Image (cartoon, helix red, strand yellow):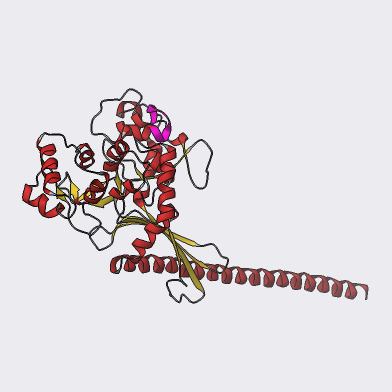
Amino acid sequence: MIRVHQRRGSALVVTLWVLAALTILAAGLGLTARTEVRIARNYTERIKCRWAARAATEAVLLRLKETDDLRLSLLAEGEKGLVLTSEELELDMGEAGFTIVIKDESGRVNVNTASAEMLENIFGDSEAADSIIDWRDADDIQRASGAETEYYSALERPYRARNASLLTVSELHLIKGISERLSSSANNTAGLVPIEIFTVYSRDRNMNAAGQKRVNILAAERNTLTTLLSDILDDSKINALMQFISAGNLREVADIVGVAELSREDIKGIYDRLTISNAEEIEGLISINTASAAVLAAIPGLDEAMAERITAYRTENGPFADVGALLNISDLPMAVFREIAPLLTARSSVYRLTASGFIREGRPFIITCVVDMNAGTPRILYWQE
């Protein structure tokens, strides 16, 4: 009888263990199923966020192509850029939504065209400037504080200097002494140079504010200049301008400030109509409407006080119509205008779009692209997602 009870007890223990094992197995399967459901839901939401960000980018590209409204609004917003949402663009995304930030690339310093003096102003010394110029120039002749392929080939992980224009801003990290002097928005350390102030994409059409091709003042005949400028200049002033050009005094359009017969108002009125280049586009000009005071202050000839004066003026009066409109700032010396004007523009057609697609409070999907609208239709220069 005792043995029967022992066998029954053993069977009960085995049964309990089996039930416990089945319970654990069922719980594990349930947990796995719930995890799989969450993974599937997260993946689905991630896809929705991605397409929300894509929709934002496509919507803005379409509006940039079809109207000038966004471009004008962008100029009015200055360095902050223009921020739009799915609600403002009247796009029903269901449970998803997006925010997109549009910024002008000409509000940044083009690292491929910046002069040594401008780079020195940014970094505070000539070493960084020499290294950057050595990296981008076509030769292997080392500047005083720079570095060429001989230096880079001796590193633990050797590589060659590009000896051509940088393809991306991140390439700065490959250049001698530059990486440790840069900060990013994620690591905005005092005393370092924000990498966000640089670009390799900025370019502007060689056209005036009305969208008309500028006239090459070095090649223009008297009749051409009379037709172009007679609404502002009388015959005597046009004669004085022609004599000034014939004497070989013109290296930049801004040199017309040296024509004694031309007033400040005359120069302001005609500056945007003239050029010394037949190029369709000019690379690396900095926008007086969208550059920060810090970027403007890096321009040779501008100090911090005048850079602040320019940004304050556009805040109070709206965006500058053209570079000549800088002369509306009464305390801007003509000599300073002469030095800085060739480096400036008042508009741009190259934009950086940063789109964030999201669902509720979840992690957004971010797309960043740079688009060139100079030809009237979007041309993607950079895309990251």
How far across and down, in percent of the image, does residue 145 sit? 36, 24
Q: Which residue is drawn at the image coordinates 85% and 73% (left, top)?
A: 7
- What secondary structure predominates along the stretch shown in magenta? helix
Q: In the rendered structure, which segment of residues is drawn in magenta?
A: 121-128
Q: Residue 340's spot in the image, x, y percent? A: 31, 40
Drawn side of residue 16 relative to residue 123, left or right: right
Q: Which quarter of the figure has residue 50?
A: bottom left
Position of the N terminus by quadrant: bottom right
Image quarter where the C terminus lies is bottom left
Q: Which quadrant of the structure image shows residue 77?
A: bottom left
- At horizontal 58% and vertical 66% (from top left) the residue drawn is 361
Q: Residue at x 49, y 77 (%)?
A: 94
Whether residue 318 is visible to the viewer of this picture, yes or no, is yes
Q: Which percent across, then down, holds residue 321? A: 31, 55
* Vertical arrangement, residue 145 with respect to residue 324, above or below: above
Q: Is residue 318 magenta?
A: no
